[in-house]
Image: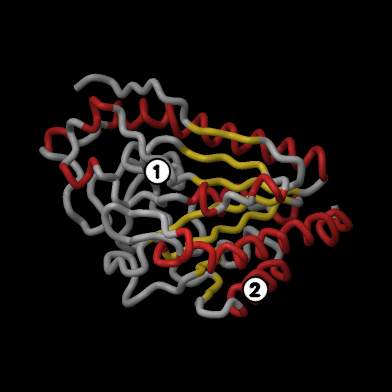
Amino acid sequence: MPLFQTDTPAFHFRAGTRPLLISIPHGGTHVPPALAARLTDEGRRVPDTDWHLERLYDFADELGASVLVATHSRYVIDLNRPPDGASLYPGQNVTGLCPVDLFDEQPLYRDSNDLPTDVEIAARRDAIWRPYHAQLTNELARLKAQHRVAALWDAHSIRSVVPRFFEGRLADLNLGTADGASCDAGLAARLLAIGQEAHGYTAVLNGRFKGGHITRFYGQPAQGIHAIQLEMTQSCYMQEAWPFEYLPQTAAGVQPTVRRMLQEVLTFLEGEGQARA
């Protein structure tokens, strides 16, 4: 099997002017042709993508936030998993660093002989995972050096019903702070309140989704870096089934709430956060 190769950069990045970085690690859809040829027809549709999040967060530049967006599909490599592939939710059904099945547990690869080897996984990690995390690390360091504090907002979305991962219907706005370890508790409480006050939406803090590797690894509130994951149900802004179209009128309902959350993060950072630094 040939070693993994890609001609596409691992990410797109825009530097902002305020101490906030928005990371979108599962927004990529690119699968290199040689790899795509090994996937099932459904796999090539990349259905488990966090679709259209860069568009949903199109106000990020107005807020002065930096934006980091993955280009490759999570099927190539999952940027929100530890580099060794260790499970984030031991004992629960989860997908791995280089997934081999879809969220509905159907095979991702056409043939079991096409599954990625350890050598290929290492090559994918070097080509995509490491550059993305290097950029994330460097930008947080830049923001902290400039502002004395920084926040990482890890933006995700998922279908509202995925029996593999949770029973019933997921809450609309799922905030995760690694059970309080990655973010100031007062800030997290204010973000939850904003979600709970939003008419027509449900919100929870550290429920089924507590934050993945990115939130857990980079959030260091004692050192002035606060990390929050928002896992949003896709029904809030798009079609949850093929062709996964963006629904502008639906999205317009939830965007003010997400923007208000991010404004609250900036208010905290540029007030209480900097005062404590």
83 versus 227 height, above or below = above
253 or 150, which lies in front?
253
- Quarter of the rendering occupied by the N terminus: top left
The front one of 16 and 111 is 16
Task: Check disc 2 and report its element: helix, strand or loop.
Answer: helix
Which amino acid type corresponds to the residue marked 1 in the rendered image? Asp
Does residue 50 appear in this view? Answer: yes
- Residue on which the image places disc 2: 194
Q: Is residue 90 visible?
A: no
Q: Point out residue 258 in the picture as x, y percentages from the top left corner.
A: 60, 63
Q: At x 54% / y 36%, what residue is drawn?
A: 133
Furthest-front residue in this view: 249
- Mark 2 surroundings: few (<14), some (14-19) or many (≥20) residues within 10 A: some
Tally the marks. 2
Q: Return the residue nearer the eye: 90 or 218.
A: 218
> Residue 134, how many percent across, how many down?
57, 32
What residue is shown with label 1? 78
Quadrant position of residue 71: top left
The mark closer to the camera, 2 or 1, is: 2
Q: Seen in the image, is 111 located left or right of residue 44?
A: left
The amino acid beneath tag 2 is Ile
Residue 62's label in the rendered image is none
Q: Position of residue 67 (x, y in %)?
A: 60, 42
Estimate the x, y position of residue 44 in percent, counting from the top left. Answer: 23, 40
- Element carrying mark 1: loop
| Residue nearest the viewer, comparing 76 with 61 | 61
Residue drawn at x 51%, y 58% is: 211
